[in-house]
Image (spheres, rainbow, N blue to C red):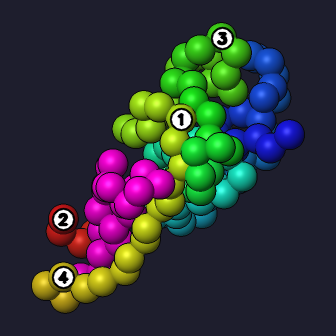
């Protein structure tokens, strides 16, 4: 079974930190900002933000037949029963689709656009990221 790394790897509440938590703490201690994680083995699309600020984007299933409904943080049967992660986007129904990522330059600053689409290509959600220290 695949497991998302935010925030614990299906560990019970109060257990030791997961590998994901340890990695995110290492990123913070080493001042490595602007790290995004991508997950391709989940069956739903989402954008989650760990309490330490690391963001995860799940590509989801490509077609409807393999898609399932995801659960929001805070559910008692989720990997985040305490609701510690923020989830700006969770596809509202089981559907296939894809994540389109583009890198460009805008006014001399790099820009990363992440856009979720359903299986017919309709845009469902997008976020634009700028490196720390660059204006948005």
* Of labels 1 and 4, the one closer to you: 1
Q: Do the residues labelled 2 and 4 touch (CB within 8 Å)?
A: no
Front residue of this view, candidates 112 and 12: 112
The dominant secondary structure in magenta is strand
In the displayed structure, 83 sits above or below 50; it is above
Q: Distance between the residues labelled 1 and 4?
A: 35 Å
User: What residue is disc 1 on?
Assistant: 94
Secondary structure type for disc 3? loop
Q: Which residue is drawn at 86% across and 40% down?
A: 1
- Give the number of the disc on residue 76: 3
Question: Nearer the N terminus, badge 4 or badge 3?
Answer: 3
Q: Are marks 1 and 4 in contact (CB under 8 Å)?
A: no
Q: Which residue is drawn at 43% across and 67% down?
A: 100
Q: How crowded is mark 1: few (under 14 residues within 10 Å), some or many (20 or more)?
A: many
Secondary structure type for disc 1? loop
Secondary structure type for disc 4? strand
Magenta residue span: 109-130
Q: Position of residue 20 (x, y in %)?
A: 71, 46
Instruction: Report the side of 46 relative to 15 (left or right).
Output: left
Q: Which residue is drawn at 47% across and 31% down?
A: 93
Secondary structure type for disc 2? loop
Question: Nearer the N terminus, badge 2 or badge 4?
Answer: 4
User: What residue is disc 2 on?
Assistant: 136
* Of labels 2 and 4, the one closer to you: 4
Q: Do the residues labelled 2 and 3 touch (CB within 8 Å)?
A: no
User: What residue is disc 4 on?
Assistant: 106
Q: Distance between the residues labelled 2 and 4?
A: 10 Å
Q: Distance between the residues labelled 2 and 3?
A: 36 Å
């Amino acid at each position: 079974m695949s497991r998302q790394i935010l925030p614990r790897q299906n560990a019970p509440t109060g257990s030791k930190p997961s590998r994901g938590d340890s990695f995110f703490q290492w990123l913070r201690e080493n001042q490595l900002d602007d790290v995004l994680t991508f997950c391709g083995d989940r069956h739903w699309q989402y954008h989650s933000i760990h309490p330490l600020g690391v963001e995860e984007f799940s590509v989801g299933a490509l077609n409807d037949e393999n898609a399932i409904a995801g659960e929001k943080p805070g559910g008692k049967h989720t990997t985040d029963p305490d609701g510690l992660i923020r989830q700006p986007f969770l596809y509202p129904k089981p559907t296939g689709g894809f994540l389109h990522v583009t890198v460009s330059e805008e006014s001399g600053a790099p820009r990363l656009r992440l856009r979720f689409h359903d299986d017919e290509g309709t845009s469902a959600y997008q976020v634009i990221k700028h490196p720390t220290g660059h204006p948005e």
